[in-house]
Image (cartoon, rainbow, N blue to C red):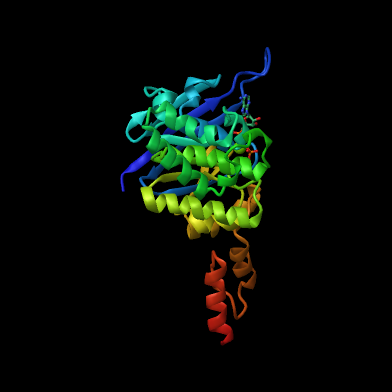
Amino acid sequence: MAPFVVLDDVHVSYPSPGPGLEAPRILRGVSLSVAEGECLALLGPTGAGKSTLCLCLNGLIPHLVDGTFRGGVHIAGHSTREWTPGELSQTVGLVFQDAESQFVSMTVEDEVAFGLESLGLPPDEIEGRLAEALEVMEVGGLRSRSPLELSGGQKQRVALAAVMAMRPRVLVLDEPTTNLDPVGKAALLRAVSRLRVAWGTTIVWVTQDVDWVPHLADRVAVLWEGQIALEGGLREVFDQGALLRRMGLRVPQVRELAARFGSTGLGGYAWLGVDEAAEALRGRLGG
Ligand SMILES: Nc1ncnc2c1ncn2[C@@H]1O[C@H](COP(=O)(O)OP(=O)(O)OP(=O)(O)O)[C@@H](O)[C@H]1O
Ligand SMILES: [Mg+2]
């Protein structure tokens, strides 16, 4: 499939913190592409620059964030240098790591309707999309609450509902499951998965939750010291357990379990999910 999101040798530095101090170089030649309809999981230790990379995808970098930007980012064939963040916002929806920072309204329902109103959509279309997004994200009961007064997990779901209602062709999720309990995580990932099926949305998903990666991602990329250190299919990347550990990351626990069996009678497995492991073990152990 044709690449839909392309980063070509992207360099980003934030302004120098003071006179005589070097400007921190965060991205140092990131090249990456994501095909239309694909879900790419982006891993990387804290401070690696994952959120910075997300800001490059919706045009906040280079348009609104101070610092220097080199290289190119193309979304659906358009350079982010030429598209304004306003134009980009109709194609790329970013759910920020700090969901609260994106709230602009007094109620959940206004928050979700805000972007739709700014598109000038007819009222019944707005109401339809609003109701759908609230239901899918399971926040319908919070319609008249202030988004600022919700729990961390509820805030994340409202922020995702607001972005989802815009039906962006590219959805960028910056650690969307951080504040969710396991049931909430599973529900959110199911909702994102339904979006993909319904609209063929291309997804860039920043996460630390490696155990959940196989539930949604087609491919994985690892950002390390400002560059993409590893990129490939899930098995290819999670086969590099030792390298990932050196970068402060880990592989899914089920994959780790398979690795621990090593050269025993149960060796030679490379499971990524619990179902896959259970199936293989049932076969081996009989019954
Ligand atoms: N606006 C800014 N000005 C200056 N430095 C910044 C700015 N935003 C981020 N940084 C610095 O850039 C580096 C990368 O930050 P970024 O938020 O992109 O990392 P991250 O990989 O998302 O980390 P985390 O996993 O903790 O969310 C960090 O050292 C951070 O302090
Ligand atoms: Mg971050």
Q: Residue furthest top?
A: 19
* 180, above or below 5, in the image: below
Q: Where does ligand 2 appear, by image quarter?
A: top right
* 214, above or below 91, in the image: below
Which residue is at 58% across, 75% downward? 267
Q: Residue furthest bottom?
A: 286
Q: Nearer the viewer, residue 171 or 112?
A: 112
**How many discs appear?**
0
Q: Quadrant of the C terminus?
A: bottom right
Question: Residue 259's spot in the image, x, y percent?
Answer: 61, 67
Question: Residue 248's spot in the image, x, y percent?
Answer: 66, 48
Which residue is at 55% across, 20% downward? 67
Q: Is residue 62 left or right of residue 177?
A: left
Q: Nearer the viewer, residue 138 or 253?
A: 138
Which residue is at 67% across, 39% downward? 150
Question: Residue 230's spot in the image, x, y percent?
Answer: 51, 48
* 119, above or below 1, in the image: above
Asked if residue 97 can be seen in this view, the reply is: yes
Question: Residue 240's spot in the image, x, y percent?
Answer: 56, 56
Asked if residue 175 can be seen in this view, the reply is: no
Which residue is at 48% across, 23% downward? 62
Q: Nearer the viewer, residue 273 or 178?
A: 178
Q: Is residue 4 left or right of residue 270?
A: left
